[in-house]
Image: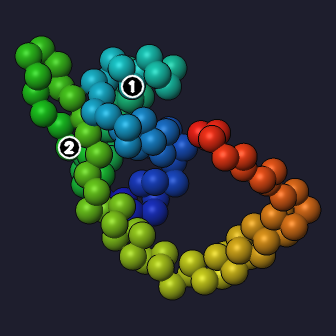
Amino acid sequence: MESTFAVIAEPSRRAILSLLASSEQSVGEIEHALNLPQPSVSKHLRVLRDAGFVESRVDAQRRLYRIRLEPLMEIDAWLAPFRQFWSTHLDALERHLDATNPLPPRTKGRKS
């Protein structure tokens, strides 16, 4: 079985995961949304399923795929110690952007 990072390193698999993050999808819906051929979608779904990233359920004549959070939570936990390296830079970028392009003051009575 491929490593977790090898599984998500493939761009089509990341695209499928991104699509499934919003809702469960059938193979046909994934094909259409990503403009990928059915055999390719099926192959990537099999790899994602074998690695535990997706699961499926049968709905009448079609199989619906949905994302499983556990493997993503494992990746998130692995990344936790490294967040300090980029969060400092992102905070500095935010301060810089706020200083160079401040938001206009809100006026009372306006909803945004």
Residue 66, percent from left and from top: 26, 40
Quadrant placement of the C terminus:
top right
Q: How many marks?
A: 2
**Picture colour scheme:** rainbow
Residue 50, percent from left and from top: 24, 50
41 or 58, which is in the foreground? 58
Circle 1 SS class: helix
Question: Is 72 positioned to the left or the right of 62 in the image?
Answer: right
Residue at 52 percent across and 54 percent down: it is 9
Residue at 34 percent across and 66 percent down: it is 73
70 or 9, which is in the foreground? 70
Task: Please tell me in which quadrant of the rendered image residue 42 appears.
Answer: top left
Circle 2 SS class: strand
In the rendered image, the vertical position of residue 25 relative to residue 32, given as above or below: below
Q: Is residue 84 visible?
A: yes
Q: Are marks 2 and 1 in contact (CB under 8 Å)?
A: no
Task: Please tell me in which quadrant of the rendered image residue 41 appears.
Answer: top left
Please give the label number shown on residue 55.
2
Please give the label number shown on residue 30.
1
- Which label's residue is closer to the chain start, 2 or 1? 1
Q: Amino acid at mark 1?
A: Ile
Q: Residues within 10 Å of mark 1 (few under 14, many from 20)?
A: many
In the rendered image, the vertical position of residue 106 relative to residue 23, given as above or below: below
Residue at 32 percent across and 34 percent down: it is 23
Between the residue at mark 2 and the residue at mark 1, the CA separation in whole angstroms equals 14 Å
Question: Is 60 positioned to the left or the right of 17 in the image?
Answer: left
Residue at 49 percent across and 39 percent down: it is 15
Residue furthest to the front in view is 108
Question: Is 25 positioned to the left or the right of 82 in the image?
Answer: left
Residue 37, percent from left and from top: 44, 20
